[in-house]
């Protein structure tokens, strides 16, 4: 069977993908979105489907549940004319024109779809430690984004813990001092990986205690919320327990770039490189948006903004393509 051809395909269904879809549909570009079914370990909608209250997305003065926000974005994409397929793209050939795409289960045959342009918005996933009790208290005291969740009432004036020793961990810990009563930072080794400036800032902060050679071994709680962490000293083997109403992982993210690895320029952490100030990648016609190319901000609103950029860049590219072929 001949592959289905599309002007533009959107791979991914978070804020970046849906914003791109809304703009492209309104521009009469007939976008099709493959929203993915448990792609990258998430339900359609991406990381926001795993969060509870989102209080920093403009337009929702009372806050909004992460899943509800993504449902609204999906409905808006469809209302504007986007075709949404609840399928996962598992193979993508960026080297030929048009681009070739394969849906899950059909990788061994001919491509199922082709496209003149692709908006790649597959996101990233925060690294987790899979500690005992982690699943039970995830989003009930455990988070991977201090900026997203730090202001939530359950963390106000409570002892908090950040795990990590790099710049992100230092930034998140300092950010959390605005809300928590005290912030403990667990560093596996005997030195911080953070830059000298950030390390000094962290070590001098009156509301921060850095625990070197320390790892968490178990998350404990009262059945509904996290209350403490079991710890172990990596040098002495000594075990202990520390009060903690919030645990924040700052041990990195993994961008979902396996589909394009070896075909498009990635940085040393496997994020897609984009031309500064645009969504353009090293492959003409392939545009990257959201957390798959953003390791600095990683917010729903910045992802949405980059989705808008990708749509406008893709629209311009497709218009030029049509003029060349005319």
Image (tube, rainbow, N blue to C red):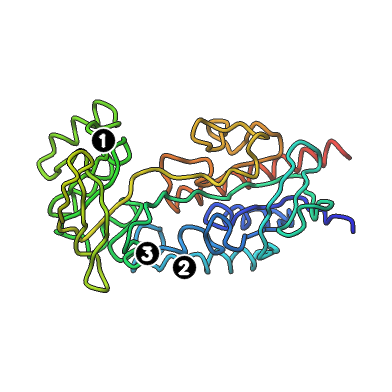
Q: Is residue 288 above or below residue 220?
A: above
Q: Residues within 10 Å of mark 2 (few under 14, many from 20)?
A: many
Tell me which corner region of the image, top left, top right, bottom left or bottom right, holds residue 165: top left
Q: Residue furthest front?
A: 237
**Residue 79 in picture, x, y percent from top left:** 64, 68
Residue 189's mark?
Answer: 1
Whichever of labels 3 and 2 marks the residue nearer the N terminus, that label is 2
Looking at the picture, tell me which residue is in the foreground, 201 or 41: 41
Q: Is residue 67 left or right of residue 86?
A: left
**Residue 11 in picture, x, y percent from top left:** 64, 52
Q: Residue furthest top?
A: 196
Looking at the picture, tell me which residue is in the foreground, 200 or 281: 200
Whichever of labels 1 and 2 marks the residue nearer the N terminus, that label is 2
Whichever of labels 3 and 1 marks the residue nearer the N terminus, that label is 3
Foreground label between 3 and 1: 1
**Residue 10 in picture, x, y percent from top left:** 66, 52
Look at 27% across and 73% down and name the residue there. Answer: 224
- In whole angstroms, how far apart are the C-alphas of marks 1 and 2? 37 Å
Look at 35% across and 65% down and name the residue there. Answer: 61
Look at the numbered discs 3 and 2 and tell me whether their residues touch, using CB distance below 8 Å. Answer: no
Look at the numbered discs 1 and 2 and tell me whether their residues touch, using CB distance below 8 Å. Answer: no
Q: Residue furthest left?
A: 206
Tell me which corner region of the image, top left, top right, bottom left or bottom right, holds residue 237: top left
Disc 3 designates what residue? 135
Disc 2 designates what residue? 67
Residue 171's mark?
Answer: none
| Element under disc 2 | helix
Look at 35% across and 63% down and name the residue there. Answer: 138
Q: Is residue 79 left or right of residue 302?
A: right
- In whole angstroms, how far apart are the C-alphas of marks 3 and 1? 25 Å
- In whole angstroms, how far apart are the C-alphas of marks 3 and 2? 18 Å
**Residue 285 in picture, x, y percent from top left:** 71, 39
């Amino acid at each position: 069977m001949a592959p289905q051809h599309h002007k533009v395909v959107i791979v991914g269904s978070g804020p970046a993908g849906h914003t791109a879809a809304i703009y492209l549909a309104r521009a009469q570009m007939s976008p099709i979105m493959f929203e993915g079914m448990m792609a990258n370990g998430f339900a359609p909608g991406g990381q926001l489907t795993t969060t509870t209250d989102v209080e920093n997305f403009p337009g929702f003065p009372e806050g909004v549940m992460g899943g509800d926000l993504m449902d609204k974005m999906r409905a808006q994409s469809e209302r504007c004319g986007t075709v949404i397929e609840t399928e996962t793209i598992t193979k993508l050939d960026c080297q030929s024109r048009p681009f070739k795409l394969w849906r899950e289960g059909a990788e061994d045959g001919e491509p199922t779809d082709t496209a003149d342009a692709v908006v790649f918005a597959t996101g990233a996933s925060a690294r987790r430690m899979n500690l005992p009790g982690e699943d039970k208290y995830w989003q009930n005291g455990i988070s991977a984004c201090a900026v997203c969740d730090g202001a939530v009432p359950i963390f106000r004036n409570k002892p908090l813990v950040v795990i990590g020793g790099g710049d992100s961990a230092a930034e998140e810990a300092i950010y959390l001092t605005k809300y928590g009563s005290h912030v403990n930072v667990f560093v596996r080794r005997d030195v911080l990986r953070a830059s000298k400036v950030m390390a000094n800032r962290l070590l001098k902060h009156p509301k921060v205690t850095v625990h070197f050679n320390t790892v968490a071994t178990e998350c404990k709680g009262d059945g509904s919320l996290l209350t403490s962490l079991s710890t172990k000293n990596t040098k002495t083997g000594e075990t202990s327990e520390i009060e903690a109403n919030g645990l924040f992982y700052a041990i990195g993210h993994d961008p979902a770039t396996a589909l394009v690895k070896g075909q498009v320029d990635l940085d040393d952490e496997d994020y897609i490189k984009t031309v500064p100030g645009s969504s353009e990648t090293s492959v003409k016609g392939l545009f990257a948006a959201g957390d798959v190319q953003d390791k600095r901000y990683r917010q729903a609103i910045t992802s949405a903004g980059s989705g808008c950029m990708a749509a406008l860049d893709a629209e311009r590219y497709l218009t030029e393509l049509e003029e060349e072929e005319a």
